[in-house]
Image (cartoon, helix red, strand yellow):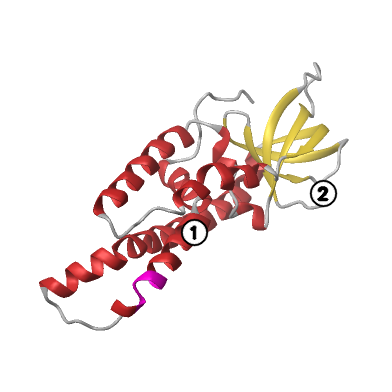
């Protein structure tokens, strides 16, 4: 199976993966806004002043909360579909494995921590934050960053592997990143892998 230079995942799946990769940041922003605006949490009626107050103190956290819920649901659906379609992939013999789970720590430090001091009650800060997120998303969907995801790392492992396709007489060695829920991963065994992007796969050890 030839790898494509384009991700095979649909835009909705890529968006969900992007959102969940930033879920830690979004939850921190939500908690931060709730803490700072706690005194404003009361019913003020349906009027202009009340709505202005709500959007000023809780607009960003409400938006991020909604986006996070959509992202989590989208990823759960994606993982279900990948599991269902795994049999449509190929059988690969993994000859070398490197664990890449530590990438998620660097991801948090590089892409999440810098936003923690932002003042999200400011419209300018909110617009700058959204603009930066759009820029990062544009880069994200065209790279292997889609599998560097702290949310996925709660259950799944990210592996860098060298493999050969079972049944290929040339025994050519390929390299790839595989997201898998197999915890006891081993070398010199066969894996079912399903391509989701350029050198990106979902996989499980073949039983």
Residue pictured at 43% horizontal, 38% vertical: 136
Residue pictured at 53% horizontal, 31% vertical: 143
Question: Is 28 above or below relative to 169?
Answer: below
Residues under numbered marks 2 and 1 in contact, where contact means CB atoms less than 8 Å apart: no
Residue to which mark 2 is pinned: 207
Q: Residue furthest top?
A: 170
170 to the left or right of 73: right
Within 10 Å of the Cα at label 2, are there few (<14), some (14-19), or many (20+) other Cα atoms?
few
Q: In front: 48, or 206?
A: 48
User: Separation of disc 2 and disc 1 at Cα?
Assistant: 29 Å
68 to the left or right of 168: left
Q: Residue furthest left?
A: 48
* Type of secondary structure dominating the magenta stretch: helix
Residue pictured at 62% horizontal, 42% vertical: 106
Q: In front: 191, or 160?
A: 160
Residue 156 drawn at (x, y percent):
68, 52
Residue range (magenta): 34-38
Q: Secondary structure at mark 2?
A: loop
188 to the left or right of 155: right
Q: Is residue 97 magenta?
A: no
Residue 83 drawn at (x, y percent):
63, 51
The disc label shown at residue 72, or none: 1
């Amino acid at each position: 199976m030839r790898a494509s230079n384009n991700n095979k995942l649909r835009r909705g799946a890529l968006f969900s993966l992007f959102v969940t990769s930033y879920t830690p940041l979004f939850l921190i922003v939500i908690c931060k806004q709730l803490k700072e605006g706690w005194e404003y949490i009361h019913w003020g009626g349906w009027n202009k002043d009340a709505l202005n107050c709500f959007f000023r103190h809780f607009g960003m956290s409400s938006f991020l909360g909604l986006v996070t819920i959509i992202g989590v649901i989208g990823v759960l659906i994606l993982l279900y579909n990948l599991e269902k379609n795994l049999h449509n992939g190929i059988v690969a013999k993994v000859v070398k494995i490197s664990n890449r789970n530590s990438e998620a720590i660097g991801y948090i430090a590089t892409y999440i921590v810098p936003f923690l001091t932002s003042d999200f009650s400011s419209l300018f800060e909110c617009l700058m934050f959204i603009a930066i997120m759009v820029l990062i998303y544009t880069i994200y969907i065209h790279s292997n960053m889609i599998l560097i995801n702290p949310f996925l790392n709660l259950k799944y492992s990210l592996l860098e592997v060298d493999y050969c396709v079972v049944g290929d007489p040339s025994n050519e060695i390929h390299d790839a990143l595989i997201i898998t829920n197999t915890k006891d991963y081993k070398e010199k065994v066969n894996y079912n892998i399903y391509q989701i992007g350029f050198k990106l796969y979902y996989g499980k050890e073949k039983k």
